Image: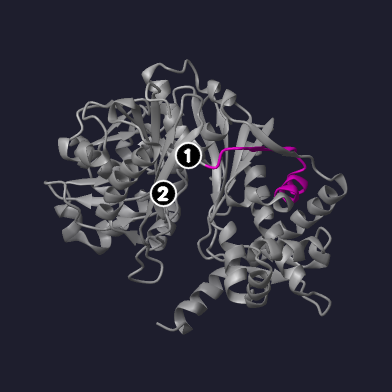
Amino acid sequence: MNNSRNVVIGVDIGTTSTKAVVFGEFGQVVSSASFDYPIIQPHPGWAEQDPDLIFSAVVRSVNAAIKKAGIRPAQVKALGFSAAMHSLIALDEQGIPLTRCLIWADNRSAAQSERLLDEMKGLEIYQRTGTPVHPMSPLPKLLWMKEEQPPLFRQAHKFVSIKEYVIYRLYEQYVVDYSTASATGLFHLDTLDWDDGVLHLLGVTKQHLSRPVPVTYILQGMKKEWAEQMGVDQGIPAVIGASDGVLANVGVGAVSPGEAAITIGTSGAVRTISSVPKTDLRGRTFCYALTDHHWIVGGPTNNGGILLRWLRDEFGGQEREVAKKLGMDPYDLLTQYAETVPAGSEGLVFLPFLSGERAPYWNAKARGTFFGISLHHKREHFIRAVMEGVCLSILSVVLAIRDVTGSLSEIRVSGGFAKSAFWRQMLSDMLGKELLVPETHEASALGAAVMALYALGDLSSLEEVKQWVHIQATHVPNEKNTAVYLELFDLYERLYQRLKDEFDALSAFQAKYSRK
């Protein structure tokens, strides 16, 4: 590439890997590199990671991306950071981890979450902080640590997220962006500071937490050894950025009020922009900070593409063999089978809660359910029902968001599911809305890069990103299918409500009789 050109690097610290993406002056991808790390599950329901492996992945991915791009350190204008939400690490006075990184998928604090809701005014806490009370968030995780590991809890000097840990290692500063802070359950949306009532409940002080700063906060003075290992100048400005969810909205161009982004990867999420913070009287949606005038209202679903992978791995041996012979992706073959079945899967309904569920039900005990199975149902019906189940869960979140923010004017979609035109069309039919498919597949990293340029003054507003995001496809809903799905959703919702108590009973049964 031209040696005089400036580039910006978006660093996206994800659940399974960290990816560094080098972007050119108009948001085009110049190069990228990523490094994976495992999820450690020492006990059922626990999900941890090694924070030092993740830090190493950050350093290595930036270095590798720069080398791939063939650029000099002086050509890198800035770094911008994105990171997965809801992580928690306890550190000692030297900044050394006392625990692994507990990630969003960790459910060990389920009992504490229930008590917070039932006995500790959890709904009021949600309405102040914008974070639903659920085992994913740091609030119940900290309560679990206080109750189950009191010596460690007392020993901890700081409680931080994975991004805060990375920033501390690079800059020796304990700072947290408003966006990441507002996903902890400890941060007051109105004051943009830690919530005194929640801190008192936990028995921690502001000194145990990082200093909250805007998402445009600029870090400088990287430690020399890490700058050299990354391959950047030590004085390079780095913008702290935000969480991956809110930056995904920026990266697909859904940055104005009423515009929504739907991401379906392993899990899924729906997010829209509001000019003021808004919470739900029933606690179904989250509200996270982006800028002073941009708040993200949305909801995550646990069950996205992971369900199709489960179907392929556990029941798709035949499809894998056929696809291998034909030189096809097994997912494409599964999708071809599903296309032969009409909307509604001829009466086969799937509640897609294999991993419990977050929005809008926030029920970790919910479980997957096929309803209506009869002798005429074949493999293709089950495949389509699973794909429809994912879309039904997305629709349930969209409807909850609409109750909070009003109608959605535009919907943009991204994530692994967006590679399937059939699945995209199914979602358009399910929602009864036109869907736009942006070209980018690096939404959170692009959002981090855009935020860096915005912080440095190179962009006057986040809306300028729309000029960089090209729409590669649109989907208009099939009205006949939409009518079918409206009826199907009513059945889906009634099924969940009637099975809710049975999920509790099943959870107790599994705990009693499952193999230890």
From the top left corner, tell me how far across and down residue 375 is, in percent: 82, 80
Q: Is 86 colored magenta in this rendering? A: no
> In the drawing, what numbered circle is on residue 417?
none
Q: Where, by quadrant of the figure, is residue 471 drawn?
A: top right
Front-most of 120 and 195? Answer: 195
The region drawn magenta spans 424-441
Disc 1: CA contacts within 10 A as few (<14), some (14-19) or many (>=20): many
Q: In this picture, is 16 found above or below 83?
A: below
- Three-letter residue code for mark 1: Ser
Q: In this picture, is 114 found above or below 183?
A: below
Identify the image's colour scheme: rainbow, by chain, secondary structure or one colour: one colour
Q: Where, by quadrant of the figure, is residue 255 drawn?
A: top right
Tag 1 residue: 444
Distance of mark 1 from mark 2, alpha carbons? 9 Å
Quick check: 34 left or right of 405? Answer: left
Q: Residue at x 11, y 46 (%)?
A: 94
Q: Residue at x 52, y 65 (%)?
A: 365
CB atoms at circles 1 and 2 under 8 Å apart?
yes
From the top left corner, tell me how far across and down residue 425 is, in percent: 75, 48
- Three-letter residue code for mark 2: Gly
Quarter occupied by the C terminus: bottom left
Q: Is 429 colored magenta in this rendering? A: yes
Disc 2: CA contacts within 10 A as few (<14), some (14-19) or many (>=20): some
SS for tag 1? helix
Tag 2 residue: 14
Front-most of 180 and 421? Answer: 421
SS for tag 2? loop
Residue 205 visible (yes or no): no
From the top left corner, tell me how far across and down residue 390 is, in percent: 65, 56
Residue 203 visible (yes or no): yes
Q: Residue at x 39, y 29 (%)?
A: 8
